[in-house]
Image: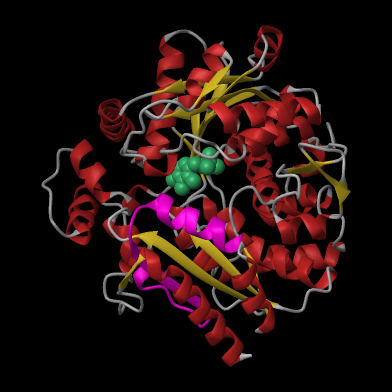
Amino acid sequence: MKFRSTRSNTCVAPSYALLHGLAPDGGLYVPETFPEQVLQYKDLAGKSYQEIASVVLSYFFTNFTDEERDAMIASAYNEHTFRDERIVPLHSIDTDVSISELFHGRTLAFKDLALSLFPYLLTAAKAQEREDRDILILTATSGDTGKAALEGFKDVAGTNIMVFYPSEGVSPMQKQQMQKQEGNNVNVSAIYGNFDDAQSFLKRVFVDPDVNAYADEKGVLFSSANSINIGRLFPQVAYYVSTYVSLVDNGAISEGEIFDVVVPTGNFGNILAGYFAKKMGVPIGKLICASNKNKVLADFFETGVYDMNRQFFTTDSPSMDILLSSNFERFLFYVAGQDAEKVAQWEKDLSETGKMAVSAEELAQLRREFEGGWIDDGETEAVINHVYNDYGYLLDPHTAVAYGVYMNRRRQGLCEGRHTVVMATAHPYKFPPVICQALALPKHDDAFDELLEIADVTGMALPKPLAELRNKPVRFGSSIEKEDMKQAVLAFVDAIHGRA
Ligand SMILES: *Cc1c(COP(=O)(O)O)cnc(C)c1O
């Protein structure tokens, strides 16, 4: 399998795309020929999550042998990295709707599913590309990605990771998760600034010739772990396939029966993986893209116009507070019938005017497979309250947005008798203040006290990573001025060099 850019026809090997992330023309890598309709239930039945992942990835990462791929998958998905041996268990709410639980990894967010495997894919690709410098992953985070990347890369040979987060811009729980990070190849810095300061600094570092030359001299190569990398995208296809198998096994649907999925969406990576699973043969009907008040995507699926010129809101579901979804370009590539010139023009419109539009025919076409929906914070809290009180099941705020969008569809008679799966992207205990608010529990200044309050009422045990967190020592407690970020990177480069 070769990968091509969404903006031109140049092709590269999977190892090259893994190591470099973005295509030189600014486009994203997609399979040169997509493996359409290759998966059938009878070939998947009885397989473990790991075996399903191996089948799915064999179509994309043809640069690895079966043995290499299976070894990486075994290192990524096991009893040390996931709290549930099924990896992605399916929870049945009632005969109409199930929840696919993507949050049983080390950081309790769905990003663990990709970031547990990605470091192995990246280091294997590095060897294939005969790259012998040490990799330094640089990441800016507003929450879940940074922690999941830290856990994924922690103590993986040949790699190092440095994470920057806005000192006042992450939840208290997320902050402690990062300040108390373990591992010998990790570094975390809070900055006095916002997420955009951190992000734009890193964008400059990646292209700064002096910084790159300095790193090169010390045997270090910069890389990133963001969700446009094929090594993060394709591992996510596996859980849509495993969800299908579980649905049939649970009797929620019969073999080959069509079901809909609702996905809480930010950068469009998760839902895109669902689209790919559908193309591979999983009988998904509608892919429903759920948004919070930052509803650029919901508006797009309604009107065909993607318009970022609007107010930005901070919401209860921070991982979905995004106006420019970085994986959306891959979706547009398929909307355009794989026409790279058209995609390049749309992306030009977006970068110059903050706006792009598909034609009426294209909109009609894509609406056969996709739909958008959104709810606000008040509704999100009401959904958490309702699902907990009626079904005894606690949703995190992101998953609650998706569940609320599902409830609205059902009320409008749009479900057509089909079973719906809501993709659950985070453990509810990652967001104690919102849960306390939704369940009308007393508030506390310390997030751990709120957690205990919630655990007391729900009887739901604290996941080990959170239970242990409170008493772990802070390793990275200081904050730096944003002007000092470059110096911090250079100092870490020196430390890596000194260790080698
Ligand atoms: C990252 C994240 C999302 C958004 O996923 P995308 O792939 O960026 O669309 C949703 N929910 C949670 C909890 C997340 O961490």
Vertical placement of residue 328 versus 237, above or below: above
The picture places residue 454, in percent across and down from the top left corner, at 22, 50
**Residue at the location (50% across, 58% down)?**
105
Quick check: can you spot residue 143?
no
Taking the image as shown, residue 280 lies to the left or right of residue 163, namely: right
Asked whether residue 475 is drawn in magenta, I would say no
- Residue at the front extreme? 210
Could you tell me residue 20's position as x and y percent? 72, 58
Q: Is residue 66 visible?
A: yes
Which span of residues is magenta-colored? 177-206
Left or right, 120 with reference to 225: right
Which is nearer the eye, 389 or 162?
162
Q: Where residue 237 sits in the image (x, y, percent)?
A: 68, 43
The residue at 66%/39% (across/down) is 273
Query: Where 183 sits versus 337, above or below?
Result: below
Where residue 387 sits in the image (x, y, percent)? 32, 31
Classify residue 473 by image quadrant.
Answer: bottom left
